[in-house]
Amino acid sequence: MSVPLLKIGVVLSTMAMITNWMSQTLPSLVGLNTTKLAAAPGGIPDRSIGVLPANPEESWQVYSSAQDSEGRCICTVVAPQQAMCSRDARTKQLRQLLEKVQNMTQSIQVLDQRTQRDLQYVEKMEIQLRGLETKFRQVEESHKQNIAKQYKAIKTKMEELRPLIPVLEEYKADAKLVLQFKEEVQNLTSVLNELQEEMGAYDYEELQNRVSNLEERLRACMQKLACGKLTGISDPVTIKTSGSRFGSWMTDPLAPEGDTRVWYMDGYHNNRFVREYKSMADFMRSDNFTSHRLPHPWSGTGQVVYNGSIYFNKFQSHIIIKFDFRTSSIGKSRQLDYAGYNNMYHYAWGGHSDIDLMVDEGGLWAVYATNQNAGNIVISKLNPNTLQIIKTWTTNHPKRSAGEAFMICGTLYVTNGYSGGTKVYYAFHTNSSTYEYIDIAFQNKYSHISMLDYNPRDRALYAWNNGHQVLYNVTLFHVVRSEEL
């Protein structure tokens, strides 16, 4: 127990002793020690009556001590009537006793005030102690939590590092295995060197001859495989969107390796400027080009670039011109006898497409129509240097009914239209001078084809479709016989 609480106990004990002393001593001092405590009605002692003298008019009336609601001692004395002698010795003694009691009462009040103040201090200290105890408990719990968190973090790190142990073991094993492989390779190298010394030099010339022979056979096989019958056309791949509704674009199938220049001609008549793009990538991503001015405007969209020169039909004529890009001059020009021109025998879409120049694996071709063949398609094989006709084939297909046409491996393929649903439906084979009707799907993505040509190097179809430059891959079929290898 703390000191302030001990003080409170001492004060309360002192008050009880004083009260007991007054209740026993005061009656004897005033000569009332023979008086007995009266009983209140009902047999219960009445502390308000106290002791009663034999003659109340000649003596004092003294009530026993009691405590008020705050715990303070109260002693009540009733003086005798004033008629009594004031010089009575007992009166003097009682007055002195009353003064002592009053002084004691004041002392008790002072002590009570101090006790109340100490009690408030103790209560305040108790609150502070409880708060401090709570803080200590919180600190202790927080410390435990911090330790737990640190332990948990360390445990987590250990769990993360634990899987590294077998990895390190494997790494050590792998390192040993690498050293073992190194030793085995060194041993194998030594063995091979010994075998080479025993066998002597190899006959590399014989091996080289066998390889060269195999390459020649493969090359011949590939040349035969390069040509075949058209069996399928892929979905279109749009390379670029540019120009007007009509035009042509192409690459040179005989260009040196690495030369991927693109040639671009917008419109189908009364134009003479050809754009040259450095590569297919430049053509797709930019408009940086070199412009070449032709000596005459072209007619239609049947131009072709072949071995560094452009071949085109001179506007409003049946003259074919070879223009050399290297010298920027006309290399050769020749009239295509009897060929219709100036929209006489055009394709179904019109556009002065009377004469269509083409290239395939066999060389340069011209497709057109004549009055002599009743406006049906005529095919002529041309010499690319002199433009002279090597051979001509006549067909039974009307030129005006054809949507577009292209040559692959000496066979002319014709579409049934140029807009909407389109397919390749007619083929004329120059190697046998025969024709057949076929059915090969052809997706006309932008609904208006004004140019369709085959490039044997890319094995692809180049198309101008309503202001879009489009590519199609082709599938060719060829049966290889054993005697051909």
Image (cartoon, helix red, strand yellow):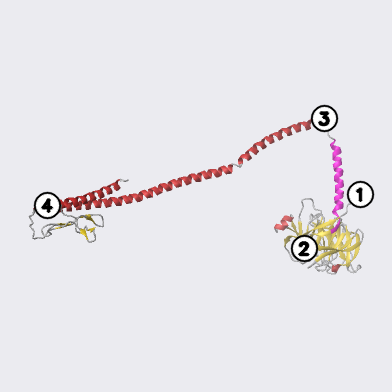
Disc 1 versus disc 3: distance between alpha carbons? 42 Å
Q: Is residue 222 left or right of residue 44?
A: right
Near mark 3 (Cα within 10 A), the count class, few <14, some 14-19 or many ≥20, is few
Residue 93 bears which disc, if any? 4
Say which residue label 2 marks. Answer: 464
**Mark 2: which secondary structure?**
strand
Res 214 visible: yes
Give the residue type that dot 3 points to. Glu
**Mark 4: which secondary structure?**
helix
Residue 52 percent across, percent down from the top left: 16, 57
**Mark 3: which secondary structure?**
helix
Give the residue type that dot 1 points to. Glu
Say which residue label 3 marks. Answer: 198
Mark 3 vs mark 2: in front: 3
Q: Disc 2 or 1, which lies upstream in sequence? A: 2
Q: Disc 4 or 3, which lies upstream in sequence? A: 4
In terms of depth relative to the viewer, which is nearer, 84 or 465?
84
Residue 398 percent across, percent down from the top left: 87, 68
In the image, is residue 209 part of the stretch drawn in magenta? Answer: yes
Disc 4 versus disc 2: distance between alpha carbons? 145 Å
Q: Is residue 273 left or right of residue 146?
A: right
Q: Quadrant of the N terminus?
A: top left
Give the residue type that dot 2 points to. Trp
Disc 3 versus disc 2: distance between alpha carbons? 67 Å
Residue 483 bears which disc, if any? 1
Mark 3 touches mark 2? (CB < 8 Å):
no
Give the residue type that dot 4 points to. Gln
- Magenta segment boundaries in residue numbering: 203-230
